[in-house]
Image (spheres, helix red, strand yellow):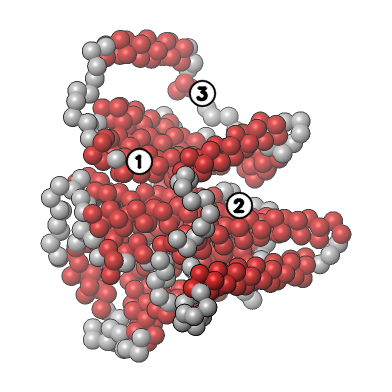
Amino acid sequence: MTLLQIIFLVIAAVMLIGSFLVVTSRRLIHAGLWLILVMAGVAAMLVILEASFLAVVEVLVYIGAISILIIFAVMLTRRVMDDTGPQSTQLWWVAGLVSLLLFGGLLAVFARVPALLVTASELPADQATVLSDLGRSLVDANRFVLPFEVASILLLAAMVGAIFIARPETSVEGGEDE
Amino acid sequence: MTGLSFNDPFGTLGNLIRTFLLGLGLPAPWVTFIQFLVGSVVLIGATLGGGAIVLIWIERKVGARFQDRLGPNRVGPFGIFQNFADAVKLITKEDITPSGADKVVFNLAPLLVVMSVVGLWAVVPFAPSLIGADLNVGVLYLLSIGGVGTLGIMLAGMSSNNKYALLGALRAVAMLVSFEIPMALVLLVPTMLAGSMGTVQIVDSQATWFVALAPVAALIFFISSVAEIGRAPFDLLEAESEIVAGYNIEYSGMKFGLFMVSEFLHAFTVSALTAVLFLGGWRGPGAETYPLLGLLYFLIKSGAVYFVIIWFRFSSPRVRIDQLMALNWKFLTPLALAVVVVTAVVQKLAEALGWPMTPSLLGANILLALLTLGVLRAYARALRQQVEAQRGPDSAPAGAVGGA
């Protein structure tokens, strides 16, 4: 086993344990924290794959923004979210069965790949060109400019909608010195 | 990674360690792994252990002078060992966990805060060949690690089971998340000017310092990073007179010490980042041949910015939360957007039309600054007229009360 594989296995184990605890921990805030650990694991995986940009974006967006949003929501609704009921419904075994099936299927597929024998293929040595190619492809008319712009319009619409919902209905005028 | 040479002590040292470990018969990837491990331990030790203690002493001394005091002067010459005494005190103090606190989260929070600050040092180029990791996404890395710090502060406030701490955490998150926006925008400017997000390349391309090419961007970066470290005048997340001590109220002993150390270290860290991104980092006469000289230049520049931050802290009153938000959303964010657009357009125009780069960018920045001042002036006037109109003709003379 190479060093990279050992690191991979350690991170994978941490992620598996973390994601198990996300769904089993009783306090919602702990579940959020375990989720952050799993996301950090994803970022570490991306680092191993030498996708530094994606790794950093993973940390920036998921850990830095989304998880903070989740924890913020939990924090503001502490009384409401305190759940004392049972953690699973009566049909938990169905969910378990489906998960097991899926896991078994995936395992069967991956068993055909001799994973421990494959060596990582070499990436282009100059990472900067990969990064700038990613940037260019988002503004290239022949590549991803359309999806990129559609996504930005969608986000803009979501933002306008959020502001509209959050805005108090009374007193449109007034400005800042109330 | 060149051969042996006395002009390059850090590279030589790295090579020595590498050849030694290879000589022990370890395979090459393991050697790289161990090298990075050793590097990070040294970096953490130097910044947290050495750096922070010296920084706190400097800040207390300088701050005392600002307030016409002497500062620590009892322990050792010039009170230089005061902080060692303080550290011993903090370590030996009782470590209290409040009842009803979320224990794991309560203990995790200071670690996250410290980690986010120390993590920033990984991409700071100290000298031509002295850097933790030359990431090609260095600038984005800086932003993403900042988010971890926000998380730590929030967890600290939330797990303490204390209303004041929770209030402090709410303020902190509102402030840190909003000030990340102008900061992120403005970080695009050095990225555009250098053509890279890597800190090493940003320093390399500063033949003329970026502060000369983008003074407005440098100023916005400086202001928003002072807000990001939560210092006066933006220290309302731990305003003593309002919410006692904010998010770290329940912490005692060394856990509080960690918060304190990370705050001081963060202040110096953003000074270092300002120096790297806008003041040319280690660049200076003779720095390329003698990297130690580069380290010295880097420390001098960071120290100068740090002095300004201390100056800020001891000479400006605390802002209110609405003023803070207005400053961020109505002033810094639009201005940062404008700076990004202006820099991009002028840079491309100058390239296409063959204008000299520095004067045209500097001129555009000065124009933008004048325009901003004009808009602010008009806004302040309109506000004042509004206030006067509300007051009516026969009240006290206006002018004593400022606008929002």
The residue labelled by disc 2 is: B197
Asked which quadrant contains residue A128, the reply is top right
Q: Which mark is residue A118?
A: 3
* Label 2 Cα crowd, 10 Å radius (few <14 / some 14-19 / many 20+): many
Q: What is the C-alpha distance between the residues marked 1 and 3?
A: 44 Å
Give residue B241's position: percent from left, percent from top.
28, 70
> Is residue B82 rendered to the left or right of residue A72?
left
Amino acid at the residue labelled 1: Ala
CA separation, marks 2 and 3?
32 Å
Q: Residue at x 67, y 41 (%)?
A: A135
In percent of the image, x 43 and y 56: which residue is there? B176
Location of residue A63 (image quadrant): top left
Q: Residues within 10 Å of mark 1 (few under 14, many from 20)?
A: few
Q: Chain of mark 2?
A: B
Q: Most extreme residue toward the right, as rendered?
A: B353
Vertical arrangement, residue A4 with respect to residue B150, above or below: above
User: Which is more toward the observer, B313 or B261?
Assistant: B313
Marks 1/2 in contact by CB < 8 Å: the verdict is no
In whole angstroms, how far apart are the C-alphas of marks 1 and 2?
Answer: 33 Å
Q: Secondary structure at mark 1?
A: helix
Q: Residue at x 55, y 69 (%)?
A: B386
Left or right: B72 with respect to B218?
A: left
Is the C-beta separation of discs 1 and 3 under 8 Å? no
Q: Answer yes or no: are tags 1 and 3 on the same subunit.
A: yes
Which secondary structure, mark 3?
A: loop
Inspect the image, locate mark 2, and give the three-letter code of the amino acid beneath it: Met
Residue A20, visible in the rendered structure:
yes
Q: Which residue is mark 1?
A: A73
The tag earlier along the polypeptide, 1 or 3, is: 1
Residue A39 relative to residue B258: left or right: right
Residue found at x 47% / y 79%: B395
**Image disc number at residue B335:** none
